[in-house]
Image (cartoon, helix red, strand yellow):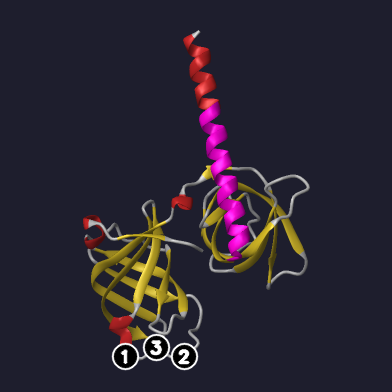
């Protein structure tokens, strides 16, 4: 995915950290990405628990080279600090400081109800659902409730009737009280991503047009 990187003065400040139970990503110097969940959040420190076993054991001498990555309304945030291994699957990040905020224009969410087919490694066959909103970095699905946080999925998003679906893979990163499941994209082809961004732009343009029509109607 193409990213627009911003290193403004605000990037040097520590942004609001994820809350307890939020999903974050630990990035190793090798580039390996390991998903984790926040166990404790206080001040400029986080205690995170690995959700999956890392490909290789975490090395104590290189822990401070780990980068913690999460998303907020500004985009994708990368922070670093002093790291200690409390057990084989529990790490404490202290004295965190911001490395950068990666801003994506496509992170803007647009309401969109479109058919989505989801497949997982834990369930046979495919699941038919629909999107609630979409962005260049992920989408919110209406369900199903069987999707678990941390589960990897393959998806097919139909943005136009009769058109070629947008396909890729992602991870379930959040569930809300209404049964919605938030999917963060892990892999999506460049061509599909361009089509998705174009679709998002068209949705925004249509919404602005509706807003103007409503304003004109009230002015008559």
Circle 1: element type: helix
Magenta part of the protein: which range? 188-209
Q: Disc 1 vs disc 2: Cβ atoms closer than 8 Å?
A: no
Q: Disc 1 vs disc 3: Cβ atoms closer than 8 Å?
A: yes
Residue 192 in magenta stretch: yes
- Count residues near mark 2 (Cα–Cα under 10 Å), then give few for <14, some for 14-19, many for 20+: few
> For mark 3, what is the residue?
58
Q: Is residue 84 visible?
A: no
* Residue at 50% across, 46% down: 109
Residue 134 in magenta stretch: no
| Marks 3/2: CA–CA distance | 6 Å
> For mark 2, what is the residue?
56
> For mark 1, what is the residue?
60
Residue 216 in picture, x, y percent from top left: 50, 15
- Count residues near mark 1 (Cα–Cα under 10 Å), then give few for <14, some for 14-19, many for 20+: few
Circle 3: element type: loop
């Amino acid at each position: 995915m193409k990213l627009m990187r911003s290193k403004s003065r605000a990037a040097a400040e520590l942004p609001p950290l994820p809350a307890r139970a939020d999903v974050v990503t630990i990035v190793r110097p090798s580039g390996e990405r390991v998903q984790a969940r926040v166990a404790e959040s206080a001040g400029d420190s986080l205690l995170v628990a690995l959700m999956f076993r890392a490909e290789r054991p975490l090395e104590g001498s290189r822990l401070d080279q780990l980068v913690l990555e999460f998303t907020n309304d500004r985009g994708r945030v990368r922070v670093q600090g002093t790291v200690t291994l409390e057990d084989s699957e529990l790490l404490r990040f202290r004295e965190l400081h911001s490395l950068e905020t990666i801003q994506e224009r496509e992170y803007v969410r647009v309401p969109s109800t479109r058919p989505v087919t989801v497949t997982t490694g834990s369930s046979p066959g495919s699941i038919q659902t629909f999107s609630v909103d979409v962005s260049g970095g992920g989408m919110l699905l209406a369900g199903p409730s069987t999707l678990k946080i941390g589960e990897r999925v393959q998806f097919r998003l139909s943005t136009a009737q009769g058109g070629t679906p947008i396909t890729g893979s992602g991870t379930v990163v959040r569930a809300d009280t209404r049964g919605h499941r938030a999917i963060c994209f892990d892999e999506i082809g460049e061509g599909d991503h361009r089509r998705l961004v174009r679709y998002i732009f068209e949705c925004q343009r249509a919404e602005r047009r509706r807003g103007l029509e409503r304003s004109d109607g009230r002015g008559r």
